[in-house]
Amino acid sequence: MLCTTCANIFRGYLEFNELYGLRARVATAKKAHHLTANSFHAAVERKCRICVIVWRHFSENEAAHLSESHQGPQSTQYHFERGLSWTPADVFTLCISNDHDGKVSYWAMYPARDADARTTRTDRNTSSDPCFELVCEWFTNCVEGHSLCKMTAKTEMDYPSRLIEIGSEDSDYELRIYTKLKGTPETPYLTLSHRWGVADFLKLTQSTFERLRCGFSIAELPQTFQDAIVVARRLGVRYVWIDALCIIQDSKEDWQNEAAMMGMIYKNAMCNISATGAWNSKEGCFFDRDTAVVDPYLIKCEWDSMPNQYYQVVDYAIWEDSIVHGPVNQRAWVVQERLLAPRILHYGREEVFWECQGLMACETFPRGIPEGFTRKASNLNRLIPRTPSGAASSKPHNKEHQPDQSDLYDNWRIIVQEYTRCKLTKSEDKLVALSGIAKQMQLHINDVYLAGMWKGCLPSQLLWHIEGDGIRPQLYRAPSWSWASVDGPAESRQEDPNGSSFITILDATTTPLAADRTGQVKNGHVRLRGRLYSAKIPDSRPWRKDLFRINSQLLGTRFNWFPDVKAENIVGDHYFLPLCAYPDQKYEIWISGLVLRSAGLSESTYVRWGYIDLMTEDMGRIVGVEEDDGEFFCSPSHYKYWRTITLV
């Protein structure tokens, strides 16, 4: 149902006006939605289809502000857009924003004749037969018809050390832990992505190994494991891999061996079942859902300016809310699992989703989620090239599907951004949980991997910064120049073709802690040539101006200063190392660089302390920026000031 306010959106006169330079070709003027937060909240309580979802899109702070604005100015407003580059011409976009900070909720309106969106009602639980028939359709079509998703030919060495034999559907077969299925390299298996939670449950340990090898009941397992086994049996797959039951939990040696193989385990699985909506192992994969919110919703639009017509209204954030922000995808380990598995079946709290190289789909859009509902980072599964069936597993696949080097470096930037926003239970796993992705990417990049970065792209990859409050772990985990040395969301700018590098990398290396060269490291350094400036930051508050001095000269125009760890003392003497220059949209020149401190090891050895962007009219004179046909570079007259330094 719709509240009266929302129902009125689809009546009356609708006039579109041309918008130049904006993302939509035409749009209507903004109009009042709910005039007060009281009205808005009452509509949510009555389960207005649109208001319930809009309320979800507002953060807790925004919702709290609206709750307090009982009789204040209008709390929400709406307008329509048409002609967006990613939507067909006859699709409208409904935009609802709050009056507090402009947060917008976007809705796609598809003509009812459009067969891309589902029109049948939703079953109350995601374990229903109709729901599973759709899962089987996605699974079969992908296995049989998607060339990029087909698995490579495997050998015995490509299989996990252990698997769980689960028997067939509707059987009372006892589960068993099997080790190294010799002679059956064609045996398919499924994997599981899940959140453990704090509850205790049956795990593989040195004391339970023999009992689990001899046989155990499915009833002994937590609900998430039971549901995953139900899915595997219904798909006709006899084996599953679950970390808690296939890695000896109280053996450090076994964990290290299996962790190094984790990427291969998920890469070679037939499918990965993801308990995406579950916060712990007790919640399971299957959920009851409120069909009043999930069912397809048709609205009859009775605008005076056009013929009456039915539209299906769909929330644009359907993938982001359920998958990207799903509980299981807040775990850093799951990034690797999503990236490397050939196909992923997501069980969300309100819908079931499918993700592979050939299709992103859900119950709302069973034939494929339209462009515009997802961003590049949303489908992690497409960020690393696949090796199609029959190709050697150690070789990249044919050039027809191979992105160029710059695309792969940019994909890695996106992977790091998604990975670092997730949480790890054990801080020392920061590089281990990314190891499988690095190995797969290395097959295609043909570059040296250095503690989360790539040697061939170091000048630009050094330009990361932490959004929010970074935390430096107590124990050494990575060199200071790597984002892996700090906990927090690591953001970086896409490499600018008009930018330039102000340094020359002479040497870069890391020393692995164990045999896995993409795992934990003992140390590392980058040796480079560039110009180092004495710098002083007299105040740590980011909103203050006139705070940054280079060689005693005050730079007071603009700058963005990102200390790696805000809690650390950043006041005092530092050094500024310019890395690149680039123009902004106003064609003003910005300089990006690192803020360093002496490492105390030698005169030329430094540690990274933060990242800074500077813009000032004096920058060309101070740093030596010159321009030639839109490209920026360091003036050769400044090369004499360059020196060799080492970052550790």
Image: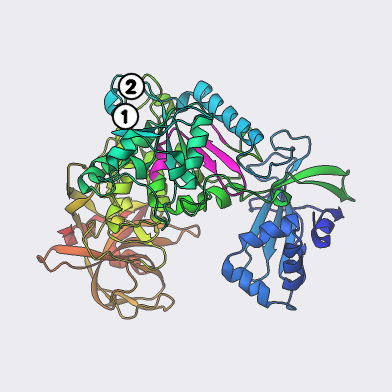
Q: Position of residue 47 (x, y in %)?
A: 74, 59
Looking at the image, which is closer to me, 78 or 360? 360
The verdict on residue 162 being magenta is: no
Local packing at callout 1 (Cα closer than 10 Å; few below 14, some 14-19, many 20+) is many
Residue to which mark 1 is pinned: 159
> Which amino acid, mark 1?
Tyr
The verdict on residue 340 being magenta is: yes
Q: Position of residue 104 (x, y in %)?
A: 64, 60
Q: Position of residue 28 (x, y in %)?
A: 76, 56
What's the mark number on residue 185? 2
Q: Which quarter shows the N terminus? A: bottom right
Q: Which quarter shows the C terminus? A: bottom left
* Residue shown at 64% from the left, 53% from the top: 22
User: Among all residues in the image, which is located at the extreme bottom?
Assistant: 538
**Magenta residue span:** 336-360
Please determine whether, in this image, residue 309 is positioned above or below residue 69: above
Q: CA distance from mark 1 to mark 2?
A: 7 Å
